[in-house]
Image (cartoon, helix red, strand yellow):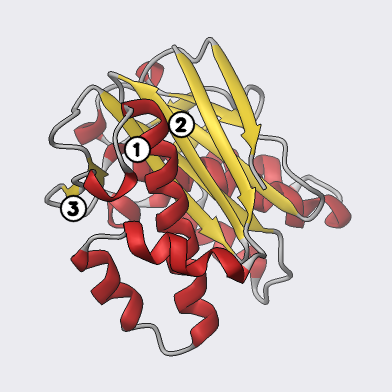
Amino acid sequence: MNIDVWYNQHRDNALYAQHWRVLDNAEKMRAEKFKTPLLQQRYVAAHGFLRQILAHYLNVSADSIRIDTSTHGKPYLPDYPQLAFNLSHTGDAIMVAVAENCQIGVDIEQCKSRPMLADLANRCFGREEIAYWQQLPEAEQRRAFYQFWTRKEAFVKATGFGIALGMKDCVLNPDNPQTFLAVPAACGVASEWHSRDIAVEEGMCAALVADKVIVSVVVHERH
């Protein structure tokens, strides 16, 4: 399976009106609920960017695309069910993954310092993951934490269940992080799921997960 990943660092507020115009009414209502202009701008940028990317594949206008959500909140295209996509954004960074006839999830995170990182790892990592993470030098643990986190977050987004699925129950193979050692029973068998890290700028981590073998990942940067 081939996957396209679109990456954008949105810092141009001049595009705000353009992005706003292509959102549907539900997206505009969600945007208006944010408490600060910055958060609203980031939401509009991310979802406007997503619609532009989808329009590129579907050859339709961005504002005509109908996006629905599943029972657990995962977005999908009811009029084009063969096209799978997922969106993640953090700060000004936006990432969209697109493929066909699969379940796919993507996550991008800033590798920020966090208090009680070990406690969070103990709550979210499986036994094999925590054993691997604990033996790393302290200087490497923060980045390794986010590498595991983005893979897990991408997995729960791909399944459509979200974090409620249980981060601890999806276990990456520390010796081969493109594969899983375990997944929740509701998600099939571990061998069906595959992960890829995505190279982004220093200080960030990103990963995607799909329920088919990933043959290639092409990253497109759009400014």
Which residue matches tag 3? 72
Rendered residue at 33%/45% (across/down): 62
Q: What mark, if any, has residue 187 been given in the picture?
A: none
Secondary structure under badge 1? helix
Would residue 196 be found to the left or right of residue 1 on screen?
right
Which kind of residue does numbered mark 2 sit on?
Val
What percent of the width, then of the height, locates residue 142? 75, 57
What percent of the width, then of the height, locates residue 199? 72, 36
Would residue 190 be found to the left or right of residue 217 on screen?
left
Badge 3 local density, few (<14 within 10 Å), some, or many (20+)?
few
In this rendering, is residue 112 above or below 191? Answer: below
The residue nearer to you, when weighing 91 against 136, is 91
The answer, for residue 170, to whether it is visible in the render is no
Among numbered discs 2 and 1, the one appearing first in the sequence: 1
The residue nearer to you, when weighing 150 against 132, is 150
Whether the residues at callouts 2 and 1 have beta carbons within 8 Å, the answer is yes
Among numbered discs 1 and 3, the one appearing first in the sequence: 3
Secondary structure under badge 3? loop
Badge 2 local density, few (<14 within 10 Å), some, or many (20+)?
many
Which residue matches tag 2? 209
Mark 2 and mark 3: Cα distance apart in space: 18 Å
Which kind of residue does numbered mark 1 sit on?
Ala
Would residue 73 be found to the left or right of residue 221 on screen?
left
Which kind of residue does numbered mark 3 sit on?
His
Which residue matches tag 1? 158
What percent of the width, then of the height, locates residue 74? 25, 48
In this rendering, is residue 88 above or below 19? Answer: above
